[in-house]
Amino acid sequence: QVDVLGDEVETLLKVLGKIYIALDHYSPVLKHYPGVTEILNVAHKVLKGESIEQYNTLLKH
């Protein structure tokens, strides 16, 4: 089960990476919408393997 879960996490991180690339491409337009920049920052940190502890309240909504 752990191996399957690890594969799922890896797949989800790849999808998140593709979403991040697409959103980053359109970021000049998306910066006009509140919260989008913050979400991009969280996605970028997750993809780099950094801690996102400070964003837990944002992610719960």
Image: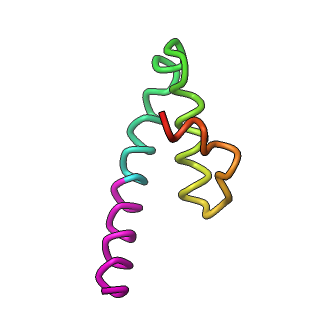
Give the quarter of the figure containing the N terminus.
bottom left
Residue 49: image x %, image y %? 61, 64
User: As displayed, is residue 54 above or below residue 6?
Assistant: above
Name the main secondary structure of what is drawn in magenta.
helix
Magenta extent = 1-15
Horizontal side of residue 7 vs 53, given as left or right: left
Residue 58: image x %, image y %? 57, 35
Q: Name the residue located 64 percent from the left edge and 52 percent from the top edge.
A: 52
Q: Nearer the viewer, residue 5 or 20?
A: 5
Residue 29: image x %, image y %? 46, 17
The quarter holding residue 10 reads bottom left
Asked if residue 14 is among those painted magenta in the image, a careful observer would answer: yes
Horizontal side of residue 21 vs 55, given as left or right: left
Q: Name the residue located 54 percent from the left edge and 17 percent from the top edge.
A: 34
Q: Which of 14 and 54 is in front in this view?
A: 54
Q: Name the residue located 61 percent from the left edge and 60 percent from the top edge.
A: 48
Q: Name the residue located 49 percent from the left edge and 15 percent from the top edge.
A: 33
Residue 35: image x %, image y %? 54, 24
Horizontal side of residue 30 vs 8, given as left or right: right
Colour option used? rainbow
In the picture as drawn, the residue positioned furthest to the top comes out as 32
Asked if residue 45 is among those painted magenta in the image, a careful observer would answer: no
Q: Which of 61 and 15 is in front in this view?
A: 61
